Amino acid sequence: MRRRVLGLVLVAAALLPLGGCIPGGLLEAIEIAVYGYIRTSEGFYAKGTPMEESITADVTADFGGLDGTYDITLDDPDGGTFGSFSGTGTVKRGRFVTLKDNESEELFSTVAAMLSKALGGESVNLTKAKAKVTAYQTPGGVEKHFKLTISFAGTITSGPSAGNTVKGKMSSEGQF
């Protein structure tokens, strides 16, 4: 009986890396592309000024196993933290994770800080911010991939573009 229990424990320990969720920890510094436009208040169909910037962020992601809880922190490599957001995601087949955040207060402040840096220090009052992170690992956890997409909309409140609306998305993808 003791031999059978020991055998089951060893088999379970050997299979543990194959059945888990995406592990947490520090991911590489990622380049986040910011696309969108800045539109003046001249009219609904007024053309906007295209915006194409990129910022770098250090990402720390902690996933709470198969229950799908997560914490994502985006740090500014130049010092400080853009912010963090957390919630519960969907885990499929033990290795695919989809995380969604629809307009949480933490996401608003994180995106506002990132957008302020992309716009050269101008402050933004956001009216919309939605994030979706998809991540998966190959069998055995050899490779781990992610894709981050954040859509946003708001009004610029300071600087030379004050009073104009801004709308667009931030995206990044890669391996960790």
Image (cartoon, helix red, strand yellow):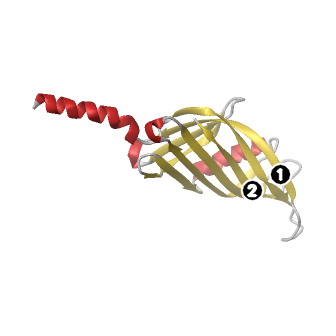
Give me the disc on residue 51: 1
Q: Position of residue 15 (x, y in %)?
A: 34, 36
Q: Which mark is residue 135?
A: none
The front one of 164 and 98 is: 98
| Circle 2 residues within 10 Å: few <14, some 14–19, many ≥20 | some
106 shown above or below 176: below
Contact between marks 1 and 2 (CB within 8 A): the answer is yes
Image coords of residue 26 (percent x, y): 56, 31
Q: CA distance from mark 1 to mark 2?
A: 8 Å
Q: Amino acid at mark 1?
A: Met
Count of marks placed on residues: 2
> Who's the residue at 57% across and 54% down the image?
104
Q: Quadrant of residue 30?
A: top right
Q: Position of residue 9 (x, y in %)?
A: 24, 32
Q: Residue furthest bottom?
A: 44
Q: Residue at x 35, y 36 (%)?
A: 16
Q: Residue sitting at 60 percent across and 57 percent down? A: 103
Q: In this rendering, is residue 112 above or below 25?
A: below
Reading the image, the residue beneath label 2 is: 168
Camera sees residue 54:
yes
Name which residue lies at 74% across and 58% down.
154
Determine the secondary structure under disc 2. Answer: strand
